[in-house]
């Protein structure tokens, strides 16, 4: 597909924020792609050069684009700067500058390869070389192509297309039906975290290729998540005999070992390898297998007392500088709790108990890598006792696991059930929200220019962000200033794509950052759209307050879902009924 043809789709996509329209446009587009181009097209649509786990940053600034434009036009830096100041979009500046340039008809694959090769340039003089490459590329582009190339490079396409929409569109393009292949596409995606690769397999090998899709060492597997239940009795009622593991309050890490090469991924599948040299060493020394993918929770550990440090201490290990010193000062222990891949084989379909046996058998004794502690029981009383004991020793609670369950990548279901300490009347769990806008403050807050966030949760069914609360407490004054600056970077004029709310904040922002929030209660409210169906009111949070700072390990779609909120709401009613003796 010619890049110029692709830009026509981008133009249409840009004009809509309705998911259904985006889906129609993308389905048309996928019908026209050549099977060798699926990968770059998917990446472009996702607004990335490669999936985040490759850790490849485009890393080109506006100043580089400006220099490239100077090279190919007669404009001076001053003129370009003035134009940029006036229209505020480097893409439009490129469009205007390159107004009379004819297109050389590059294909999407050619543009992708050129950008990829440019980004890979490193070492001395790399900035200059990159600028030259971009200038050469822009010489081959007409004005519209230039606009989108530049916006892509700077991360400003802002189409707001979610992965579910891309998956639906591919399903429709191949099968004629939006849902026919959707589950299979998603399953494969969950196993490799690379939608470009999945798309390529689908377009090249068809549905059979997709159904026999297997995890591959080096590609992170989307992590499984837990459901909640309010009591030991209900957990045993649901699962029968199960494993009850300690729930460690640290950082969830997925470690992949390919002989001497170890990679570590965070919960949102970003590459964290350089941050945890101690765990990399631990995996190399203590994991007795050529290839393996294992998961665990990393917690800062006090060797002298045998105590686990709280999350606030563990999180200090997430840093860009002084990594080695900090690793010595606060070594991490990885409490491994699952094995997903071993010696060339994807074992996610095997039962938990079998995977666990294999996991235990490959861990050599040592400081860093240990198996998570657990009991196996069918007694609510025993579960409760273990829960109390775990909390006393610094855990957050327990995680119950069905013995015969496969590892269902990317799924939240009752294969795992978490139980945390419930505070009187309060929610027994935190909620992860994503800001979709903010209100300018009044009174004291006016000087910061921000008084409250408009917060949303994620609705998986419609792939949209639905409002649930206005939040004005929990941050320090400095943090309010900081968050306003961050949100301003993602400011948009009108309600962003995939955002669903009736409330209009002073400033809209595209969903990007996750904050963890504690609230007293989930209530019903006609104000908010989370869970709202027709006349039925939505959910709202009573006395919400932010805890900590941006959850960098989560992406917007990892926000708590409407379905979870609805379950928490029901559970809250049950807990209340119990505590009032009814
Ligand atoms: P939550 O973040 O409260 O939804 O709980 C799920 C998280 O608990 C997982 O993502 C893990 O990071 C963490 N966790 C701690 N201990 C375990 C364990 N033994 N098994 C599974 N997850 C655990």
Image (cartoon, rainbow, N blue to C red):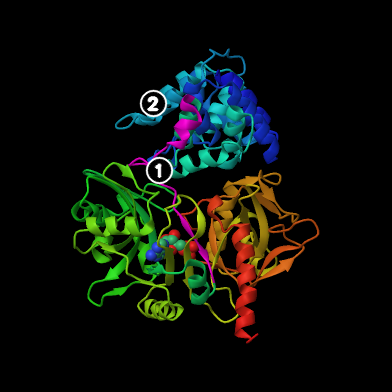
Pointer 1 or 2: first along the chain: 1
Q: Residue furthest bottom?
A: 581
Q: Quadrant of the N terminus?
A: top right
Q: Residue 511 placed where, x, y %? A: 60, 50
Looking at the picture, tell me which residue is in the foreground, 313 or 499. 499
Q: Is residue 64 visible?
A: no
Foreground mark, 1 or 2, reads 1
Magenta stretch: give its range: 204-229
Frontmost residue, 482 versus 115: 115
User: Residue 53's mark?
Assistant: 1
- Residue appearing at x 19%, y 59% in the figure: 364
- Residue located at (44% from left, 42% from top): 193
In 3D space, how far apart are the residues under numbered discs 1 and 2 (Cα atoms)?
Answer: 18 Å
- For ligand 1, give the image quadrant: bottom left
- Residue 441: image x %, image y %? 67, 63
Residue displayed at 37% across by 51% down: 350
The residue carrying mark 2 is: 117
**In the displayed structure image, the side of residue 394 where residue 64 appears, left or right:** right
């Amino acid at each position: 597909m010619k890049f110029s043809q692709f830009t026509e789709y981008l133009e249409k996509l840009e004009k809509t924020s309705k998911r259904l329209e985006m889906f129609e446009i993308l389905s048309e587009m996928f019908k026209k792609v050549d099977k060798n181009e699926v990968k770059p097209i998917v990446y472009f649509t996702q607004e990335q050069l490669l999936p985040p786990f490759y850790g490849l940053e485009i890393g080109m600034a506006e100043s580089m684009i400006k220099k490239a434009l100077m090279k190919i036009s007669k404009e001076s830096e001053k003129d370009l700067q003035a134009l940029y100041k006036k229209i505020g979009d480097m893409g439009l500046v490129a469009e205007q500058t390159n107004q009379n340039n004819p297109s050389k008809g590059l294909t999407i694959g050619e543009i992708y390869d050129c950008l990829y090769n440019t980004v890979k340039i490193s070492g001395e003089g790399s900035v200059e070389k990159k600028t030259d490459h971009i200038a050469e590329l822009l010489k081959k582009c007409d004005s519209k192509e230039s606009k989108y190339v530049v916006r892509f490079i700077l991360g400003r396409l802002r189409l707001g297309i979610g992965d579910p929409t891309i998956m639906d569109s591919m399903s429709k393009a191949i099968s004629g039906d939006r849902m026919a292949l959707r589950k299979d596409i998603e399953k494969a995606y969950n196993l490799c975290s690379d939608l470009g690769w999945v798309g390529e397999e689908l377009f090249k090998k068809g549905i059979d290729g997709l159904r026999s899709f297997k995890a591959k060492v080096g590609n992170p597997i989307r992590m499984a998540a837990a459901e909640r239940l309010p009591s030991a009795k209900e957990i045993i009622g649901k699962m029968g005999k199960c494993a009850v593991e300690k729930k460690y309050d640290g950082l969830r890490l997925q470690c992949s070992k390919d002989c001497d090469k170890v990679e570590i991924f965070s919960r949102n599948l970003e590459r964290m390898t350089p941050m945890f040299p101690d765990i990399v060493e631990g995996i190399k020394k203590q994991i007795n297998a050529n290839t393996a993918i294992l998961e665990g929770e990393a917690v800062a550990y006090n060797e002298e007392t045998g105590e686990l440090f709280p999350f606030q201490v563990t999180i200090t290990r997430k840093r860009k500088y002084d990594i080695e010193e900090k690793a010595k000062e606060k070594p991490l222990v990885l409490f491994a709790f699952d094995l997903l891949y071993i010696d060339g084989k994807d074992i996610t379909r095997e039962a938990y108990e079998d995977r666990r046996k294999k996991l235990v058998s490959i861990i050599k004794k040592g400081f860093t890598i240990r198996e998570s502690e657990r009991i196996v029981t069918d007694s609510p009383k025993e579960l409760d006792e273990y829960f109390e004991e775990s909390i006393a020793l610094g855990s957050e609670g327990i995680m119950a696991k069905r013995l015969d369950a496969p590892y269902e990548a990317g799924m939240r279901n009752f294969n795992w059930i978490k139980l945390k300490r419930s505070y009187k009347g309060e929610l027994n769990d935190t909620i992860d929200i994503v800001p979709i806008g903010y209100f300018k403050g009044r009174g004291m807050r006016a000087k910061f220019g921000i008084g409250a966030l408009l917060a949303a949760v994620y609705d998986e069914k419609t792939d949209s962000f639905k409002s649930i609360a206005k939040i004005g407490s929990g941050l320090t004054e400095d943090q309010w200033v900081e968050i306003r600056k961050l949100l301003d970077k993602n400011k948009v004029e009108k309600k962003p794509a995939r955002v669903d709310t009736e409330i209009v904040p002073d400033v809209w922002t595209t969903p990007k950052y996750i904050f963890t929030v504690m609230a007293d209660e989930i209530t019903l409210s006609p104000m908010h759209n989370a869970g709202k169906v027709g006349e039925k009111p939505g959910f709202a949070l009573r006395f919400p307050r932010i805890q900590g700072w941006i959850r960098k390990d989560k992406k917007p779609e990892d926000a708590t879902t409407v379905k979870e909120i609805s379950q928490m709401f029901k559970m809250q009613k049950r807990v209340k009924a119990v505590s009032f003796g009814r």
